[in-house]
Structures are given as structure tokens and as C-alpha cells.
Amino acid sequence: MTLTNLMWAGPSRWRLWLNDQPLGPEDPLLPHVRVLRVTPGTATLAVSRGPRENAVVVLRPGQTYRVHQDRLDDPGLRH
């Protein structure tokens, strides 16, 4: 799951793109993903990893969360 972009104009006025799919505060929820918080630079998401397992993930634009590996990929970080 990749946060491809994020626009923030206030706590209830934001739009983010997960895997290039737009999502705002008034849009229907995505299966297995719940938006917990959006700030000018991050989105905090609760991601279902199974029937009783959730991961709380904070993503910045360009970051990818690999759900099945429970791994965050950040193209801005150099190894």
C-alpha cells in the first residue's frame, strides 16, 4: 500500500491517494484500511493484517507499507 500523495487544508479538509486511489474524510472506507489521522505531511492508518490483527502505520507521501511483510519501504532512505 503506497501513499502516493497527500493534500491537507485542515483536520477535516484533506485528501490522500492510496495506491493512486483518492480518499477524503467524507469518502466510504476502504476494505481493511481505516484512516486514523491526517496531518500536513503524514497519514496514520490502521491496516488489517488478519482477523484479529491490525497494524498502525504512519506514512509520508512516497512511502509503501508491505502489509504481508509488515515492512515500510521509503525510497528517500539510502542504505
Image (cartoon, helix red, strand yellow):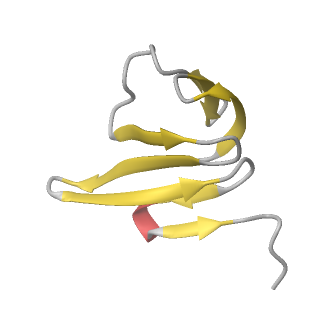
Q: Is residue 31 above or below residue 74?
A: above
- Name the residue nearer the viewer: 1 or 59: 59
As drawn, the residue found furthest toward the front would be 10
Q: Position of residue 64 (x, y in %)?
A: 63, 56
As drawn, the residue found furthest toward the left would be 52
Q: Is residue 45 above or below residue 18?
A: below
Q: Position of residue 72 (x, y in %)?
A: 58, 67
Q: Who's the residue at 61% across and 42% down the image?
A: 39
Q: Position of residue 35 (x, y in %)?
A: 43, 38
Decide if residue 59 is on the left or right side of residue 29.
right
- Name the residue nearer the viewer: 65 or 23: 23
The C terminus is located in which quarter?
bottom right
- Name the residue nearer the viewer: 69 or 4: 4
Q: Looking at the rendering, which quadrant does residue 78 occupy?
A: bottom right
Q: Is residue 61 above or below residue 67?
A: above
Say how many tags the image has: 0
Decide if residue 67 is on the left or right side of residue 32.
right
Q: Who's the residue at 62% across and 37% down the image?
A: 19
Q: Position of residue 30 (x, y in %)?
A: 39, 29
Q: Who's the residue at 64% across and 31% down the image?
A: 17
Q: Who's the residue at 68% across and 52% down the image?
A: 60
Q: Is residue 46 above or below residue 10?
A: below
